[in-house]
Amino acid sequence: MNTKQLIKQCQLNNYSAQLQVYNAYKNMMFGAAVRILKSKEEAEDVVQDCFIKGFKKIHQLKEDANLGAWLKRIVVNKSLDVIKEKKKIVWVDEILTLENEVAEENEVTDAVSIDFVKNCIHQLKEKYSIILTLYLIEDYNHREIGELLNIKESTVRNQYKRGKQQLLLLIKNKKG
């Protein structure tokens, strides 16, 4: 069954089609949720909630839509909602001045594994970790991240730069 047919069958509340969607996208959704939430248990709950929400709202989806991207957006939004409910994150809109000079000093030349980098990202302050995860791993751009977090794009850019600087320092310190 192709994606168009799968969406149509899910819109008709076909359990077999829903199970097929679940099996096709559960790992992708769990991966996105766990990278943001840093907790397997919370990520499992979020993924379950997102599938329920997705199947309830699938009638709004056009047949030629990207089902994976739509489900990913739901899981990212829900994961961010969970973080917002747990604690307030203060996004600071500051202007960074020495961007280019700092970037050259912080280049990491030795090869490091993706898992090592992900582990380092999780050790950063949550506001940096979230933005770096959305940008570097989930492939959202600064504008999209600003919309997801309800903050200015300039704030996202500045928090990204600060987080990236801290990440590079952390990688250097852990490797050295």
Image: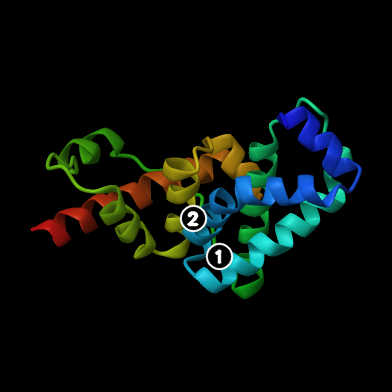
Which quadrant would the N terminus be assigned to in this image?
Answer: top right
**C-beta proximity under 8 Å, tags 2 and 1:** yes
Identify the residue under disc 1.
89
Report if residue 152 is visible in the image. no
What is the number of the mark on residue 128? none
Is residue 125 or residue 63 the one in the foreground?
63
Which quadrant would the C terminus be assigned to in this image?
Answer: bottom left
Q: Residue at x 52, y 39 (%)?
A: 154
How far is disc 2 from disc 1 in space, using C-alphas?
10 Å
> Where does the image place residue 157, in percent across and percent down from the top left?
46, 40
Is residue 88 or residue 60 the one in the foreground?
60
Please tell me whether residue 176 is drawn above or below residue 88 in the rendered image.
Answer: above
Task: Mark 2 or mark 1: name the one nearer the start of the chain.
Answer: 1
Circle 1: is it few (<14), some (14-19), or many (20+) Cα within 10 Å?
A: few
Identify the residue under disc 2.
130
Amino acid under disc 1 = Ile
Please tell me whether residue 129 is drawn above or below residue 17 in the rendered image.
Answer: below
Is residue 160 or residue 174 the one in the foreground?
174
Helix, strand or loop at label 2? It is helix
> Where does the image place residue 145, in percent across and percent down from the top left?
57, 43
Is residue 27 or residue 85 the one in the foreground?
27
Amino acid under disc 2 = Ile
Quadrant housing residue 158: top left
> Where does the image place residue 139, in percent across and percent down from the top left?
49, 37
**What residue occupies the far right of the structure in this picture?**
12
Q: Residue at x 50, y 46 (%)?
A: 134
